[in-house]
Image (cartoon, rainbow, N blue to C red):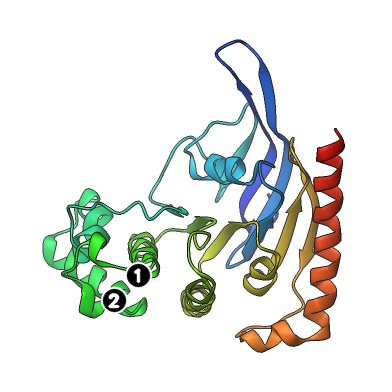
């Protein structure tokens, strides 16, 4: 593990076996180092193992080979040091927005007054203070995902793991959520591993863009982003953004075509 890395993925691979005994390699042996406060986006074609890799880091799945180290300790299951945000909103429908954010804090044994103080702080950061007493069904998709983000951040995780968190949102809401997440990251300086299939999103959000091959997935490239923080959507109109998008698009098209001919 390098001196400035907090996450080290070493030779991690995943093979699934069906009920009929057939084996499918979802993820080839993969190595990746993630530094403190890094924002790494993982881009790849559908079914390439992006989510499998993220679930292994989260401790929700077990690698067939290799290991994941967080702060030098082997990941062997879920933990409060990793906050997970899924594409689906995963809120408890019977709890208010405030109590959804309090849930992890309650499970950690914090006093109710402390839970409420922390939850309200993070609801403020995602712009949902006025909706604390609402239930998930009363919220838009973007508001539900903001609640899920607040819940993850409220637990003070070492890393934030995000599995296509804005994939179900409409285009305009998605762009607003991207800006919101970046503004929070720029303040909180959490380490983020962010899975997406959207090239523009990967470039705009990431300080590094990792491209995976078609299944069985492997890391094909790892490119640093040339854009400084804080960022605005103006970077999308630059020649530098367009050039990087062309390069990544070509990489993905090559992988999709190879998979179709296999």
User: How many residues crowd mark 1 within 10 Å: few (<14), some (14–19), many (20+)?
Assistant: many
Q: In this picture, is 12 found above or below 174?
A: above
- The spot of residue 91 in percent (x, y) is 30, 54
Q: Are marks 2 and 1 in contact (CB under 8 Å)?
A: yes
Residue, x 54% and y 56% (percent of image)?
164
Report the front residue among 58 and 89: 89
Residue in front for this viewpoint, 80 or 184: 184
In the image, residue 258 lies at what x, y percent?
Answer: 86, 41
In the drawing, what numbered circle is on residue 128? 2
Give whichever of discs 2 and 1 has the lower sequence position. Answer: 2
The residue labelled by disc 1 is 143
Whether residue 211 is visible: yes
Q: Where residue 237 sits: x, y (%)?
A: 74, 86
Taking the image as shown, residue 144 lies to the left or right of residue 97, namely right
Position of residue 212 relative to residue 175, above or below, is above
Q: Is residue 152 left or right of residue 40?
A: left
Looking at the image, which residue is at 51% across and 77% down?
Answer: 172
């Amino acid at each position: 593990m390098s001196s400035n890395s907090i996450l080290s993925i070493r030779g991690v691979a995943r093979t699934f076996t069906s009920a009929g005994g057939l084996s499918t390699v979802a993820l080839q042996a993969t190595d990746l180092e993630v530094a403190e406060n890094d924002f790494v986006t993982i881009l790849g074609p559908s079914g390439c193992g992006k989510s499998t890799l993220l679930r292994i880091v989260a401790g929700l799945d077990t690698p067939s080979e290799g290991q994941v180290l967080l702060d030098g300790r082997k990941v062997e299951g879920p933990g409060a040091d990793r906050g997970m945000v899924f594409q689906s909103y995963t809120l408890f429908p019977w709890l208010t927005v405030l109590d959804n954010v309090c849930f992890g804090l309650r499970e950690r044994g914090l006093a109710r007054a402390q839970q409420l103080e922390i939850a309200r702080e993070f609801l403020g950061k995602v712009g949902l203070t006025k909706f604390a007493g609402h239930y998930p069904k009363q919220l838009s998709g973007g508001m539900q995902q903001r609640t899920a983000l607040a819940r993850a951040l409220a637990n003070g995780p070492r890393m934030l793991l995000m599995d296509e968190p804005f994939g179900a949102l409409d285009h305009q809401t998605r762009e607003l959520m991207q800006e919101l997440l970046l503004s929070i990251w720029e303040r909180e300086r959490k380490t983020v591993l962010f899975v997406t299939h959207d090239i523009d999103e990967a470039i705009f959000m990431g300080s590094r863009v990792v491209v995976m091959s078609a299944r069985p997935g492997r890391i094909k490239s790892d490119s640093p982003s040339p854009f400084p923080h804080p960022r605005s959507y103006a970077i999308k109109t630059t020649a530098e953004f367009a050039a990087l998008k062309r390069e990544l698009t070509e990489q993905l098209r090559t992988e999709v075509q190879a998979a179709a001919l296999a």
